[in-house]
């Protein structure tokens, strides 16, 4: 089983928490295994965050990264933090023009089953 964990901020998001949960629950390429909504702090700002554990079958990590970049656009986020068994990274919105920043595992919220 290959798993993907994401931290998706809900501020500046066109969808509320329930809509985000429903979106991920209905994806055909991923199976939503567990999630929580948790207040996380980034750059001194508290933001409710959708923390999810998803299962997938892709062999290429690049496909997961492209999907996450598309989710950034769909959810109007500049980035989404993600972790798989092979990578820890930030997927950026394809339209993001600001300075990039690195994945910080101390800020990432994990779901442990």
Image (cartoon, rainbow, N blue to C red):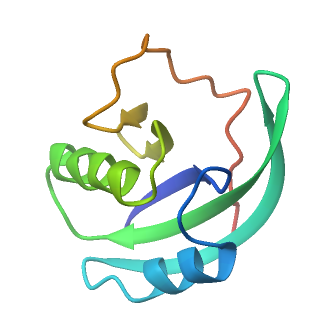
Residue 12, image x, y percentages? 61, 50
Q: What residue do we see at 56% from left, 71% from top?
A: 15
Q: What residue do we see at 55% from left, 74% from top?
A: 20
Q: What residue do we see at 25% from left, 36% from top?
A: 94
Tell which residue pokes out farthest to the top in this image.
Answer: 99
Picture quadrant where residue 55 is located: bottom left
User: Does residue 36 lie above or below 89 as drawn?
Assistant: below
**The N terminus sits in image quarter:** bottom left
**The C terminus sits in image quarter:** bottom right
Residue 107, image x, y percentages? 72, 31
Residue 24, image x, y percentages? 45, 77
Residue 1 shows up from this direction: no
Query: In the shown orientation, is residue 60 left or right of residue 88?
Result: left
Residue 31 shows up from this direction: yes
Residue 54, image x, y percentages? 46, 69
Q: What residue do we see at 33% from left, 82% from top?
A: 27
Query: In the shown orientation, is residue 10 left or right of residue 66?
Result: right
């Amino acid at each position: 089983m290959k798993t993907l964990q994401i931290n998706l901020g809900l501020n500046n998001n066109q969808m509320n928490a329930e809509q985000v949960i429903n979106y991920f629950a209905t994806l055909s390429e991923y199976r939503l295994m567990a999630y929580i909504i948790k207040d996380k702090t980034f750059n001194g700002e508290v933001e409710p965050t959708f923390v999810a554990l998803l299962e997938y079958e892709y062999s290429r990590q690049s496909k997961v990264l492209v999907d996450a970049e598309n989710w950034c656009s769909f959810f109007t986020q500049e980035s989404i933090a993600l972790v798989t068994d092979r990578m820890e990274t930030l997927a950026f919105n394809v339209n993001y023009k600001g300075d990039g920043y690195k994945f910080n595992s101390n800020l990432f919220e994990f779901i442990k089953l």
